[in-house]
Image: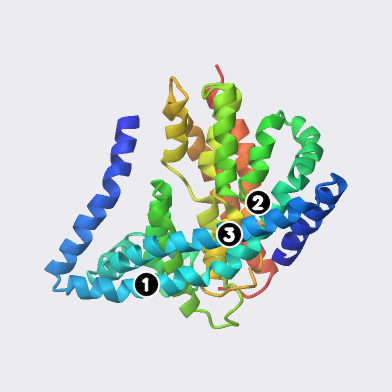
């Protein structure tokens, strides 16, 4: 199965790069000119996200580096212990919506320490794969079009993250425990 | 909501740093966070520019519209406020497809294009998210992942006997998350008023 998966991942982008310009030429599109016309907006779009990302990442980094995150984990661990959620993975669960890079680092560390086929290894693998960096995505996407009022987006995003936590725990227990 | 979350992170961060006697970490962290943000934005310039060009081509070739047509039954239910032939639908479909395949580099630019198109449809204040944007981001952050490429790579690196064992659990967990996110989005939309 891994061969199929990695083949799809490797071929997807080259296939798009082949098919899109080819179909465009056949439809009589001036490919180079149209590409440049579209690409023109790239710089402005990327630069527009700077103030939003600075605001969010400053807060996230202060929260993480100051030790406030560790304290949060310390208080939440006993609560989640009731449903059998290991405290080791909780740091990852809290980090995941805030910082993609940091969460991946924690996941790698846990897989290295406990082994990829241990319960903790499988749980953190599932959680890493199944959620996105909610705060980063919201800040980046809204920031690129100048939206400051997110309305209820954070609530639905965090509810999804919480669901992933419970569903991952259930799935790893039900499908992957021997 | 975002204002409180933001304030809470900084506030509790400063208190925690003061209590542990390392108040200087706050200053270092603030600067470090700002630098990471600028680096991230700058590294986005290249991929956004590239994919915006490809997207414009796909649009001119009629590929975006064809994809939007394919996904119509689903998008009509999820985005009732977006006209069915609008380019936003095509960009949304491409973004979700890239997410599913684990193509992070392509997903982000397509998502930003979708947001630009959705912003063109924004009839309210331009600094406030529309219901369609909220639905799109609910789908995007919880998005069904079929191929968690990065984590499979890490599992192989540390000698897993079955690196793809977590594909099934990942699909299950993201499917649950997507259902909850879309349901919550619908309920909250009604609660916050403004249909469509």
Residue B188 spot, x, y in % from top left: 66, 63
| Badge 2: chain ID | A
Left or right, residue A63 beside residue A40: right
Q: Are marks 2 and 1 in contact (CB under 8 Å)?
A: no
Res. A85 in view: no
Which residue position is annotated with label 3? B35
Which image quadrant: the N terminus of chain B?
Answer: bottom right
Q: Position of residue A175 (x, y in %)?
A: 53, 26
**Residue shown at 50%/51% (left/top)?**
B143
How far separated are the C-alphas under marks 3 and 2?
30 Å
Does residue B25 show up?
Answer: yes
Name the residue at the right extreme. Answer: B19
Q: Residues within 10 Å of mark 3 (few under 14, many from 20)?
A: some
Residue at 40% in and 67% down: B89
Residues at marks 2 and 1, CA–CA distance in whole angstroms: 29 Å
Residue that badge 2 annotates? A159
The chain letter under disc 1 is: B
Mark 3–mark 1 distance (CA, rounded to whole Å) = 34 Å
Question: Same chain for the residues at labels 3 and 1, yes or no?
Answer: yes
Judging depth in this view, the residue of A19 and B185 nearest the camera is A19
Q: Residue at x 55, y 68 (%)?
A: A50
* Circle 1: element type: helix
Q: Quadrant of the C terminus of chain B?
A: bottom right
Q: Are marks 2 and 1 on the same chain?
A: no
Of callouts 3 and 1, which one flags the residue occurring earlier in the amino acid sequence? 3
Mark 3 vs mark 1, foreground winner is 3
The quarter of the picture where residue B129 lies is bottom right
Q: Position of residue B128 (x, y in %)?
A: 61, 76
- Chain of residue at mark 3: B
Q: Which residue matches tag 1? A: B87
């Amino acid at each position: 199965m891994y061969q199929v998966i990695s083949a799809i991942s490797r071929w997807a982008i080259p296939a798009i790069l082949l098919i899109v310009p080819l179909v465009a030429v056949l439809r009589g599109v001036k490919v180079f000119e149209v590409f440049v016309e579209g690409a023109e907006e790239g710089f402005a779009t990327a630069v527009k996200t700077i103030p939003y990302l600075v605001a969010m990442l400053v807060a996230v980094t202060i929260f993480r580096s100051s030790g406030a995150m560790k304290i949060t984990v310390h208080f939440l661990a006993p609560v989640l212990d009731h449903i059998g959620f290991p405290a080791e993975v909780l740091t990852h669960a809290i980090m995941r919506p805030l910082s993609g890079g940091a969460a991946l680092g924690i996941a790698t560390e846990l897989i290295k320490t406990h082994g990829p086929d241990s319960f903790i290894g499988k749980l953190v693998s599932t959680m890493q794969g199944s959620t996105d960096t909610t705060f980063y995505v919201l800040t980046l996407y809204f920031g690129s079009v100048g939206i400051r009022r997110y309305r209820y987006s954070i609530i639905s995003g965090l509810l999804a993250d919480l669901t992933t936590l419970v569903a991952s725990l259930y799935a790893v227990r039900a499908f992957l425990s021997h | 909501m975002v204002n409180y979350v933001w304030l809470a992170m900084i506030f509790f961060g400063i208190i925690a740093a003061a209590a542990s006697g390392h108040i200087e970490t706050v200053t270092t962290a603030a600067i470090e966070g700002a630098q990471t943000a600028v680096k991230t934005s700058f590294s986005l310039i290249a991929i956004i520019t590239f994919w915006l060009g490809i997207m414009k081509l796909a649009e001119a070739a009629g590929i975006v519209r064809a994809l939007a047509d394919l996904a119509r039954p689903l998008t009509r239910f999820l985005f009732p406020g977006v006209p069915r032939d609008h380019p936003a639908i095509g960009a949304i479909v491409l973004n979700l497809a890239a997410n599913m395949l684990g193509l992070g580099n392509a997903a982000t630019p397509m998502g930003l294009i979708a947001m630009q198109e959705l912003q063109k449809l924004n009839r309210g204040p331009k600094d406030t998210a529309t219901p369609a944007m909220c639905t799109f981001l609910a789908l995007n952050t919880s998005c069904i992942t079929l191929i968690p490429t990065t984590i499979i790579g890490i599992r192989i690196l540390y000698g897993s006997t079955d690196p793809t064992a977590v594909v099934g659990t990942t699909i299950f967990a993201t499917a649950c998350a997507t259902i909850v996110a879309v349901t919550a989005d619908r309920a909250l939309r009604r609660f916050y008023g403004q249909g469509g």
